[in-house]
């Protein structure tokens, strides 16, 4: 592996570790740990749209986000997003810091969700849709 690539990977690892903070091993983080499956996206029930996704929150404060978007159109097409990172819990809020590409650690996506029981709702800006609400159900 080349030195610039190793340096870039080390920088990404350090950035993700810094996001974890002191909350990573707290009881609040452990309480929300689990797999959350996408139930609705922008008000549409996922099974009817072809979209799918999941967020895995681990007790050590790390997170994995996977999403498959199946936009309407001809011909049908889809694209996949996977991101890894960390999360912190403050009351009912869950703040994520996710990176899709370790080669570009400065591009951190920071969605914030609200947890109510077994439901996690993320709000984030959509490029054409304005505010997007993605509702995930804990499995």
Image (cartoon, rainbow, N blue to C red):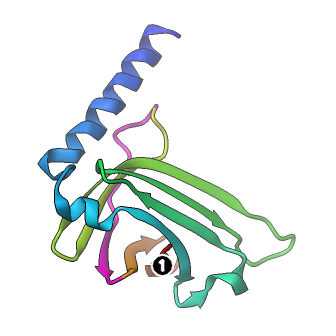
Residue designated by label 1:
137
In the image, is residue 49 part of the stretch drawn in magenta?
A: no
Residue 50, horizontal then vertical, whole percent:
72, 76
Q: Nearer the viewer, residue 79 or 96?
A: 96
Residue located 41% across and 25% down the image: 9
Q: Is residue 52 left or right of residue 2?
A: right
Foreground pick, 45 / 119: 119
The part of the image, by quadrant, that contains residue 124 is: bottom left
Query: Nearest the camera: 96 or 74?
Result: 96
48, above or below 86, in the image: below
Q: Which residues are magenta?
A: 103-117
Question: Which residue is painted at 27% across and 59% down in the image?
Answer: 30
SS of the residue at dot 1?
strand
Q: Is residue 56 left or right of residue 44?
A: left
Residue sitting at the far right: 75
Q: Position of residue 21 (x, y in %)?
A: 16, 46
The answer to which of 73 and 96 lies nearer the viewer is 96
Instruction: Identify the residue shown where x is 27% and y is 30%.
Output: 14
Is 112 part of what is drawn in magenta? yes
Left or right: 41, with 105 as reference point: right
Work out which residue is located at the far left of the displayed protein and give it. 22
**Is residue 68 depicted above or below 11 in this figure?**
below
Q: Position of residue 135 (x, y in %)?
A: 46, 81
Asked which quadrant contains residue 51, the reply is bottom right
| Residue 127 position (above or below residue 16) | below
How packed mark 1 is, by other alpha carbons closer than 10 Å (few <14, some 14-19, many 20 or more), is some
């Amino acid at each position: 592996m080349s030195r610039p690539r190793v340096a870039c990977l080390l920088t990404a690892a350090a950035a993700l570790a810094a996001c974890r903070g002191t909350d990573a091993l707290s009881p609040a983080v452990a309480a929300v740990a689990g797999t959350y499956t996408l139930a609705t996206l922008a008000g549409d029930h996922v099974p009817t749209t072809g979209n799918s996704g999941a967020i895995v929150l681990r007790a050590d404060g790390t997170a994995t986000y996977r999403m498959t978007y199946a936009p309407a159109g001809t011909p049908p097409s889809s694209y996949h997003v996977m991101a890894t990172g960390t999360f912190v819990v403050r009351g009912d809020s869950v703040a994520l810091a996710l990176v899709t590409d370790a080669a570009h650690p400065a591009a951190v996506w920071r969605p914030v969700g609200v947890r109510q029981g077994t439901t996690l709702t993320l709000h984030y800006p959509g490029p054409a849709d304005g505010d997007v609400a993605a509702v995930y159900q804990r499995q």
